[in-house]
Amino acid sequence: MIRQFGAFALGAVTLGAMSAVSIGTASAEKLGEGGADVKHVLLVSVDGLHALDLTNYVASHPGSTLAELSRHGVTYTNASTSTPSDSFPGLSALVTGGSPITAGFWYDVTWNRAVAPQAAGNTDIGSTGGSCPGTIGAVVEYDEGIDIDLTALDGGGGINPAYLPRNPDGCVPIYPHQYLRVNTIFEVIRSHGGRTAWTDKHPSYEWTNGPSGTGVQDFYGPEINSDPVALPQFPGCSPVPYADNTPDDGWTNSFDDIKCYDSLHVQAVLNQIDGYTHDRAKWVGVPALFGTNFQAVSVGEKLKVDPVTGASGGYVDVLGHPAPGLAGELDFVDASLARMVSEMKAQGIYDHTLIIIAAKHGQSPIDLSKRRGIGNGEPATTIGAAEAFDISDDGSLIWLKSPSLTDGVVASLSLPKNQQTLGIQEIFAGPSLRDKFNDPTRDPRTPDIILKVNTGVIFTGNTNTKIAEHGGFNEDDVHTALLVSHGGLAVRTVKSAVSNQQVAATIVKALGHDPEELQAVRAEQIHVLPFLFRDDSFRAD
């Protein structure tokens, strides 16, 4: 199945933490208070984009759009995404300011000790149903497995409530937005009269609406795991470059297929820049807050060889130089960003738009010589009957049938032969887990055990088609790109540690509102990103 320990700086940034160009411009242009300079925020998550990828691309492509954005923006070269580094907690950090501690999102598929199972199983995904309220403790699945029809680009029309976990009190389905524990930036901005929009890879990302269910006015979630179909509106996408109708494979098995899929996201943003809804059906005005994500880079990092062109993916060395497949995906993303920037300029909104380039997650390993595929149903095979559920990509979140079994399972996992079998680097359980996350005996969502594995370990079996994964806790998983660009900003590189959780607070402040309107920001005391606003206290001169 595909599914924070990172710290962030809260104090003043020292001169030694900035680049030379930062020192020279420390009192230069910044954003004004009260939304005076920013009328719109475009948030783009380039999933898989490491800080190193951004550094390398800008250096080798000085005429690129990413280079242009960085010339009047702040690049945070020591930014971290969530831990675990999955899309759900990764995006939650960006749009709520919360970690799993407050937001409650651990992965797109998890276990919850306090919910009842879904009513029916989905044969396309292999899920099963169960009784309610007779069974307490169940899988919480919020990926393509809850679509009405995951083979259809529109998910068959959305979410099938029969595939949702249920509240034992009344046995009513729990929709993704109801599962989120804190509000989102979309809810905050909409509460102040701003229009909102978001585009993502599954219908389940309707959770960006927040607990109110109404935060995003224009949501678009074409199913990335649907059967690829011709998209004649985009060059090179009709016929589909690589036809693959195997259920749940989707658009991610070809470097060109994923470009076609991502083009749907790009077109949605272009329509919104023009003032229309994502499908261009109605003129509504440019959103105050909108955004999307790209999957192209993630696929470029994970897919070993393209089935049509034979191009190789991943990296060619430990310094992060991309192989041809990944290089093409990076070029595609940059060209797509160029279209967005060009359209903003044409519509006269570019000078008033804050553009944020981030990543929900990284991808590991960059050094492909470290790749080690582990199959055989691990880690469940090693753990045995005590396990209730695990989600394991390049790290493992493990829920046991009872937290009381934790000590015994940890003792078994600690045996040298089991550590070798599973590629374990660190085991977090008991006090070491509670130091970082909620107590699993009190929070029904928190795993009992977390395995941080050696860099390069991926739980995908011995197949060589996938060469990297995300969801883990290593450097390549969590050290992600972060660039904040606006015409009123001076070029700056900040090397101090920051977190994607600070993006949410920054967006709310940039649009003229109090970041503490975000519940997670209050609860976790998250600060805005440094060196963006004129009220920053630090001055180099």
Image (tube, grey):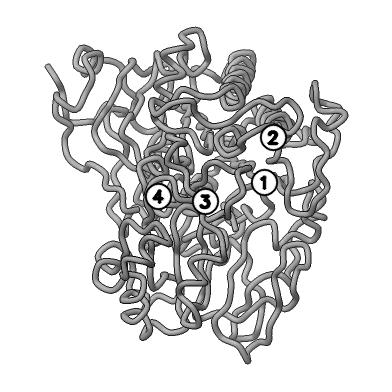
Q: Quadrant of the N terminus?
A: bottom right
Quarter where residue 299 is shown: top right
Which residue is rendered at x = 43% and y = 33% of the image? 50
Say what amino acid the circle numbered 1 marks.
Phe
CA gap, disc 2 to disc 4? 24 Å
Give the mark toward the camera: 1 or 3: 3
The residue indicated by pointer 3 is 373
The residue indicated by pointer 4 is 82
**What is the secondary structure assignment of the residue under circle 4?**
loop
The residue indicated by pointer 2 is 258
The residue indicated by pointer 1 is 219
Residues tagged 3 and 4 counted as in contact (Cβ below 8 A): no
Q: Quadrant of the C terminus?
A: top left
Say what amino acid the circle numbered 4 marks.
Ser
Q: Is residue 277 left or right of residue 509?
A: right
Which residue is rendered at x = 24% and y = 71% of the image? 431
| Earlier sequence position, callout 2 versus callout 4 | 4
| Earlier sequence position, callout 3 versus callout 4 | 4
Q: Residue furthest top?
A: 63
CA gap, disc 4 to disc 1? 23 Å
Q: Is residue 46 above or below residue 428?
A: above
Which residue is rendered at x = 38% and y = 67% of the image? 418
**What is the secondary structure assignment of the residue under circle 3?**
strand
Say what amino acid the circle numbered 3 marks.
Gly
**What is the secondary structure assignment of the residue under circle 1?**
strand
Give the mark toward the camera: 4 or 1: 4
Which residue is rendered at x = 20% and y = 12% of the image? 24
* Residue in front for this viewpoint, 300 or 434: 300
